[in-house]
Image: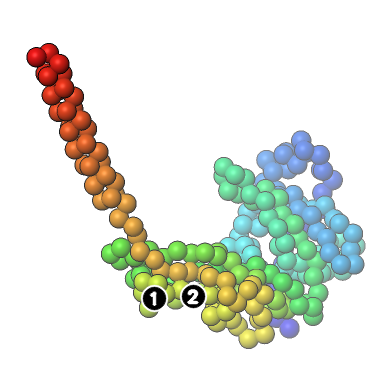
């Protein structure tokens, strides 16, 4: 069996808001581990280590975790909370999983060839950023790739048309649109024409008003 990357976590006592804030200031991210067969465990992870692990292995990777007086077990990143300003992770949920049980996961959609499509008045609209799949944890893709370089006006790609790895099942509705190619409306030109028409109407109105004034004076 393929060896899973190790994620170093330690038990934490700091649970209150002030203590958690100090924990982050010291370079740690608070994390909670939960799952089938274990009680929820409050832990902490070095911010730099978690960032490196995600960048190197991906969000859907299975990590091995070892805690004092416990057998090592496997976890996935179930949910991560981000700071709205810095976009840094400020809390993470780690779910204990079995490597022999299939699970559902959200997999990012990566677009290739967008610049080839978006020429002239064409634009690519992405309807969905992720798709849901089911598979064994260690077989979860980090992303799925869609090549849109051959698409033209009116073309689209649905979830069911995405090529998935073997043993990975699509759970998203197969008819769900992922991308579609449409035409940019020439709003600017229409606005200019409308403005020109309004200006002409205003000029005509001013001329009529001036004529009425002259007639009334006569």
Give the residue drawn at x 72%, y 39%.
Answer: 21
| Mark linked to residue 151 | 1
Q: Is residue 3 visible?
A: no
Give the residue drawn at x 63%, y 74%.
Answer: 173
Give the residue drawn at x 20%, y 30%.
Answer: 205
Give the residue drawn at x 14%, y 28%.
Answer: 207
Expressed as whole percent of the image width and height from the top left, the position of residue 130 reads 59, 66
On the rendered image, what quadrant is the N terminus found in? bottom right
Indicate whether 161 appears above or below 28. Answer: below
On the rendered image, what quadrant is the C terminus found in? top left
Judged left or right of residue 180, residue 165 is right
Expressed as whole percent of the image width and height from the top left, the position of residue 31 reads 76, 53
| Viewer-proximal residue among 43 and 210 | 210
Indicate whether 192 appears above or below 172. Answer: above
Pointer 2 local density, CA inside 10 Å: few below 14, some 14–19, many at least 20: many
| Viewer-proximal residue among 109 and 89 | 109
| Mark linked to residue 157 | 2
Expressed as whole percent of the image width and height from the top left, the position of residue 209 reads 18, 24
CA gap between label 2 and label 1 equals 9 Å
Outermost residue, bottom direction?
166
Circles 2 and 1, Cβ within 8 Å, touching? The answer is: yes
| Viewer-proximal residue among 103 and 87 | 103
Q: How is the image coloured?
A: rainbow
In which quadrant of the rendered view does residue 215 lie?
A: top left
């Amino acid at each position: 069996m393929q060896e899973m990357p190790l994620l170093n976590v330690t038990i934490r006592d700091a649970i209150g808001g002030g203590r958690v804030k100090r924990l982050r200031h010291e370079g740690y991210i608070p994390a909670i581990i939960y799952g089938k067969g274990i009680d929820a465990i409050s832990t902490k992870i070095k911010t730099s280590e978690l960032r490196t692990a995600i960048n190197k292995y991906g969000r859907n990777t299975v990590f091995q975790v070892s805690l004092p007086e416990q057998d090592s077990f496997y976890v996935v990143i179930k949910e991560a909370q981000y700071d709205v300003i810095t976009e840094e992770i400020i809390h993470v949920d780690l779910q204990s999983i079995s490597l022999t049980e299939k699970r559902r996961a959200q997999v990012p959609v990566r677009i290739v060839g967008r610049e080839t499509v978006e020429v002239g008045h064409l634009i690519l609209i992405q309807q969905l950023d992720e798709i849901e799949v089911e598979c064994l944890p260690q077989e979860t893709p980090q992303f799925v790739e869609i090549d849109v370089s051959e698409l033209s006006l009116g073309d689209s790609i649905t979830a069911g048309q995405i090529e998935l790895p073997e043993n990975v099942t699509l759970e998203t509705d197969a008819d769900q649109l992922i991308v579609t190619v449409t035409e940019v409306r020439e709003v600017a030109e229409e606005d200019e024409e409308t403005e020109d028409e309004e200006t002409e109407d205003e000029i005509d109105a001013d001329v009529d008003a001036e004529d009425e004034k002259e007639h009334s004076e006569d």
